[in-house]
Image (tube, rainbow, N blue to C red):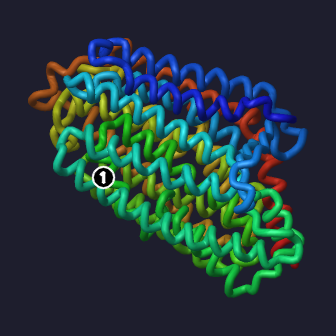
Amino acid sequence: MTGMWWLTALWAVPMAGGAAVILLPATARPFVRWAALAVSLVVLVIALVLALRFDPAGTRYQFVENHPWIPSFGTGYILGVDGVALVLVALTAVLVPLLIIAGWNDAGAQAKSTHAYFALILAVESMVLISLVSLDILLFYVFFEAMLIPMYFLIGGFGADRPAASKAAVKFLLYNLFGGLIMLAAVIGLYVATANSPVFAHGTFDFRAVADAARFGALNISPGLANALFGGFMFAFAVKAPLWPLHRWLPDAAVHATPATAVLMMAVVDKVGTFGMLRYCLQLFPQSAATFRPLIIALAVIGIVYGAIVAIGQTDVMRLISYTSISHFGFIILGIFAMTEQAQSGAALYMVNHGISTAALFLIAGFLVSRRGSRAIADYGGVQTVAPILAGTFLVAGLATLSLPGLAPFISEFLVLVGTFIHYPAVTAVAATALVLSALYILWMYQRMMTGPVAVGNDKLRDMVPREMAVVVPLVALLLVLGVYPKPALDIINPAVGHTSSGTAQGVAR
């Protein structure tokens, strides 16, 4: 299916919208929020059109756009979407309007701050979307790195504790820039390798061409070089995802950013890292992926257990939730590198479900913290008495985070574990301990914060207001719908994962 500029519109609308928002006069401050929300809703409509017109039984990449960019460098403006990219596009398009509503009052009192805050959110959305739909490796890399800049300003410029937020933003930027520099060397090395390959007349960044050559063993790259290039890509994606032990930047960034910014980072931006592993690491370097699979699986399992254990010991509710994400990213990476179709389908679905459940839990916790002015779990107690709707939705989001059957994350985690068990039964057993640990940290947190007598200072906490309900209700609905009927998402994901899995198997066999 040809593109008809749908994918260009997908990322250009939020980019142009962000530019328009920042250029609005200071007197238009009350209009800025509504303008940003309107732009994000237009993006959601475009994503829905793509989803409705996408044919799971059709060609692998659909809505393809292919135009010259820098022909002398073998790079083009090539866009296309497969099933995995499509569900992540849909996740991004659904979450951003909700995050704009959730962060309605997060920008502060100054008009310029309001303009900048919402323009930066739209810029991040634009860059994530073009990264997901890019089929040119250099184009992907440019926006993979560029999205760090607006995220840096969102983290450092709008947190409640500005000095701590600025420090966390610098940590976020340095970690991810270093990973990006390593990846840049690998991107250049891959281009040189294609230039020296007899398959290509000159070097190319066309992902489809390079992946096909790797699949049929036509790249003629030495194992040592292939391993080095794989390592460059994998390192950058492991920092962004993040994979233990490269996770140290995440808790600080999540805690000191605004809740909406933290969710944008964990539920949207970080998914580009796991998406990159599934698309680029496995398909461009199948033999290297197979070589390093035991090491990556070991790190993923450590991350699963480590994140869960550290979460149990947290006294800060926002930091606790951020550590749960480290554990969940471990499950996603485990599913990707288990290299079975079941596990990879589960990992792709997990990316979506984690985004929804983390958004719900983190935003509801953020609403509570904004009322009480404290992130300390010990300062709460009896919240369900004074704010029953807030406590009830917090419980549903928490139960989704611990993968309760009937809620969306369960089926994705189940698929990852079943698919991994085929080749790694012992690893699966260790990873499954996180199911018990997650129940411990979620239910204990809920017990301390929501049950029992009303703690001093909590008696006047108000329940959710309509604006907050407008954010939480769609997220809870998605958790319920995808929990009992994940078939529509899996029908889109499975063909793309089947292509990836068969291509990787062919590449390894050669």
To which residue does mark 1 refer? 169
For residue 208, say whether it is visible.
Answer: yes
For residue 399, say whether it is visible.
Answer: no
Residue 386 vs 424, above or below: the answer is above
The quarter of the image holding the N terminus is: top right
Tell me: 315 left or right of 205: left
Q: Identify residue type, mark 1.
A: Ala
Q: Position of residue 425 (x, y in %)?
A: 67, 70
Picture mark count: 1
State the residue lying farthest toward the front: 72
Identity of the residue drawn at 87% across and 75% down: 218
Q: Secondary structure at mark 1?
A: helix
Q: Position of residue 508 (x, y in %)?
A: 81, 75
Residue 357 vs 195, above or below: the answer is above
Identity of the residue drawn at 63% across and 68% down: 187
The quarter of the image holding the C terminus is: bottom right
Badge 1: how crowded within 10 Å, few (<14), some, or many (20+)?
Answer: many
